[in-house]
């Protein structure tokens, strides 16, 4: 199995990356690597596999057989333990300048092996302006054996001075059939469940995997899709908003608590806190900073969970619009065809479009400092407002 096995529905992209790995190998065999592209920007919609593609490309660059998937270099690069691969995967809303400066210092080092030093920033759209400025010089004048791989949803999400110096690699949304085949072949999922998960996820690989393998995820999605039929009055709007916020909090809580506990344990070990005879100088401010970051991360986990629910909710209203426009294609929520058709008859395309706009406006608002519950209450009232009694 090669390193490209997890790139679902990206056949053209895989061939493109394979050819670039071959070019990189030729550069290594020559006397100079000046012909090698040292900065890459992987873009694609959420769930398309940007991070998987970046890791696969890094593994192939470090493999003497161009990504066999079996050697030590491939296995450690994919697992995140290769000495010459550094990944930045942030749990915060931004990537700060101090973190980027550490990366730039590492980029200046020679690789431990005989090939490349590779640095992957999986959320390059979250770089602060100062962090982007710190990164710019290393991308402009990288050491000969250093390769930068940045990932972002779109090219426009990365500041012009960075993206203009990177070679673009664009991923597409995987087709439903490819996602279903992946779930069946890689995870042994029943074909009926696989097709449902692929369709409901709208091509998002991670979401499809969760829907296929976790009944709790399916149940939460089912509850979200009941909301359009429950918005009968102001009280029901408030109830639906509260339920959605509570469900997101409960979904995010186990993940936050697990990470928090490990980080506190690691910090205590690093400072020797609680060890008899050891003065843990600096432990208190370090713990305070850690807890501040953990609170920010917990908020983000909740907002991410809400955002997934809003995308599921948007899929329902998109189906309503599709029926109103007379589309003959399959619906995202095919199992709810009767409810979708009923709402399509009871309202207009203009109202459905307004509801979709309200959902996406709420998603944008949640990127800021607005309280999630207030944003959701406002949204539910907007969704209720277009109903014809």
Image: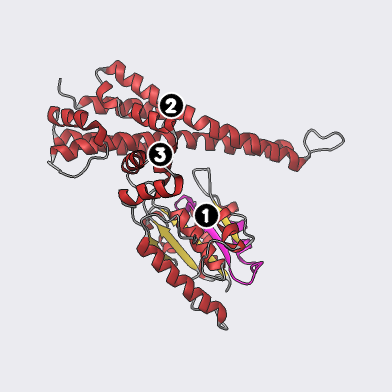
Q: Which residue is mark 3?
A: 212
Query: Bounds of the magenta span?
Result: 101-127
Q: Of all residues shown, which one is farthest toward the right?
A: 277
Q: Can you say whether 13 is above or below 237 in the image?
A: below
Mark 1 is surrounded, within 10 Å at the Cα level, by few (under 14), some (14 to 19) or many (20 or more) other residues, namely: some
Q: Can you say whether 73 is above or below 309 in the image?
A: below
The secondary structure type at the circle numbered 2 is: helix
Q: Is residue 368 visible?
A: no
Mark 2 is surrounded, within 10 Å at the Cα level, by few (under 14), some (14 to 19) or many (20 or more) other residues, namely: some
Position of residue 145 measured from the top left corner of the image (x, y, whole percent): 58, 71
Q: Nearer the viewer, mark 3 or mark 2?
A: 3
Q: Which residue is mark 1?
A: 130
Report the front residue among 282 and 179.
Answer: 179
Q: Nearer the viewer, mark 1 or mark 2?
A: 2
Q: How many marks?
A: 3
Q: Can you say whether 214 is above or below 122 in the image?
A: above
- Seen at 53% across and 43% down, the residue is 91
- The quadrant of the picture occupied by the C terminus is top left
Asked if residue 103 lies in the magenta stretch, the reply is yes
Q: Of label 3 and label 2, which has the lower sequence position?
A: 3
- Quarter of the rendering containing residue 357: top left
The secondary structure type at the circle numbered 3 is: helix
Position of residue 143 measured from the top left corner of the image (x, y, whole percent): 58, 71
Q: Which residue is mark 2?
A: 247
Report the front residue among 237 and 312.
Answer: 312
Position of residue 333 measured from the top left corner of the image (x, y, whole percent): 27, 36
- Quarter of the rendering containing residue 318: top left
């Amino acid at each position: 199995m090669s390193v490209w096995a997890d790139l679902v529905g990206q056949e053209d992209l895989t061939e493109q990356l394979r050819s670039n790995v071959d070019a990189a190998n030729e550069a290594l065999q020559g006397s100079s690597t000046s012909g090698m592209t040292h900065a890459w920007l992987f873009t694609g919609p959420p769930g398309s596999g940007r991070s998987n593609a970046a890791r696969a490309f890094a593994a192939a660059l470090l493999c003497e057989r161009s990504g066999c998937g079996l050697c030590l270099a491939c296995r450690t690069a994919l697992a995140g333990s290769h000495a010459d691969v550094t990944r930045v995967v942030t749990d915060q809303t931004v990537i700060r300048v101090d973190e980027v400066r550490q990366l730039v210092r590492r980029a200046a080092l020679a690789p431990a092996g005989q090939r490349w030093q590779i640095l992957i920033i999986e959320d390059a759209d979250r770089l602060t302006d100062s962090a982007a400025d710190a990164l710019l010089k290393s991308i402009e004048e990288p050491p000969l054996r250093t390769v930068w791989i940045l990932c972002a949803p779109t090219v426009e999400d990365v500041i012009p001075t960075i993206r203009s110096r990177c070679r673009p690699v664009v991923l597409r949304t995987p087709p439903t059939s490819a996602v279903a085949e992946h779930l069946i072949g890689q995870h042994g999922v029943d074909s009926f469940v696989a097709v449902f998960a692929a369709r409901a996820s709208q091509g998002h690989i991670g979401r499809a995997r969760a829907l296929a393998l976790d009944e709790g995820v399916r149940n939460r999605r089912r509850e979200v899709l009941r909301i359009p039929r429950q918005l009968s009055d102001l009280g029901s709007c408030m109830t639906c908003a509260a339920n959605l916020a509570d469900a997101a909090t409960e979904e995010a809580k186990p993940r936050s608590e697990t990470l928090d506990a490990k980080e506190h344990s690691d910090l205590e070990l690093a400072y020797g806190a609680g060890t008899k005879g050891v003065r843990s100088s600096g432990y208190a401010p370090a713990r305070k900073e850690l807890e501040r970051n953990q609170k920010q991360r917990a908020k983000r986990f909740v907002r991410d969970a809400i955002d997934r629910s809003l995308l599921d909710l948007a899929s329902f209203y998109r189906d309503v619009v599709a029926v109103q426009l007379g589309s003959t294609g399959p619906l995202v929520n095919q199992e709810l065809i009767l409810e979708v058709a009923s709402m399509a008859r009871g309202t207009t395309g203009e109202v459905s479009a307004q509801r979709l706009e309200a959902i996406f406006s709420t998603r944008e608002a949640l990127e800021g400092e607005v309280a999630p519950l207030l944003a959701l209450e406002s949204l539910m009232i907007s969704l209720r407002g277009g109903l014809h009694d």
